[in-house]
Image (cartoon, rainbow, N blue to C red):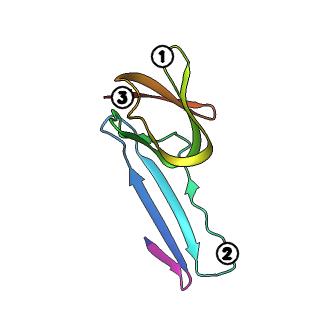
Amino acid sequence: MGLQDSNKIILGSAYKLDNNSRANFILERITDNPETSVKPNYYSKDLIIFPNPAKENLYFGKETTFEITDLQGKILLKSTNPVQSVNISELEAGVYFVRVGNCVRKFVKE
């Protein structure tokens, strides 16, 4: 975090999902102006899901719509409304895929 001017704050954060992934970075400038709408700028376009492996819930890095499929491509869970997490407790243990737009990630259900 840093102060740019008397009414501007710069916020930044780096994070890694695990030891094998590259770092992601988020940067935002906040201006003290009630007329301004502030939205985060995500410089990584990667789909972030965690934890992996998961037992009860799978979380997304931001609110999003999704589809969860099995290895054969059958859609098992789906949301057309943006959510930040999904309960996966009813899925059997195994490997699944989560799709958000054109991005697909593999995850393991314990």
- Using the rendered image of the protein, determine whether residue 63 is visible from the camera's viewpoint: no
Mark 2 is on which residue type? Thr
**What residue lies at 50% left-to-right and 70% top-to-bottom?**
10
In which quadrant of the rendered view does residue 13 lie?
Answer: bottom left
- Within-10-Å neighbours for mark 1: few <14, some 14–19, many 20+: few
Disc 1 secondary structure class = loop
* Residue furthest top as drawn: 72
Disc 2 secondary structure class = loop
Q: Quadrant of the N terminus?
A: bottom left
The circle on residue 71 is 1
- Within-10-Å neighbours for mark 3: few <14, some 14–19, many 20+: many
The foreground one among 90 and 103 is: 90
* CA gap, disc 1 and disc 3: 13 Å
The foreground one among 80 and 33 is: 80
Q: Nearer the viewer, mark 2 or mark 3?
A: 3
Q: Which span is picked out in magenta?
A: 2-7
The first of marks 1 and 3 along the sequence is: 1
* Residue furthest right as drawn: 35
* CA gap, disc 2 and disc 3: 42 Å
Q: Nearer the viewer, mark 2 or mark 1?
A: 1
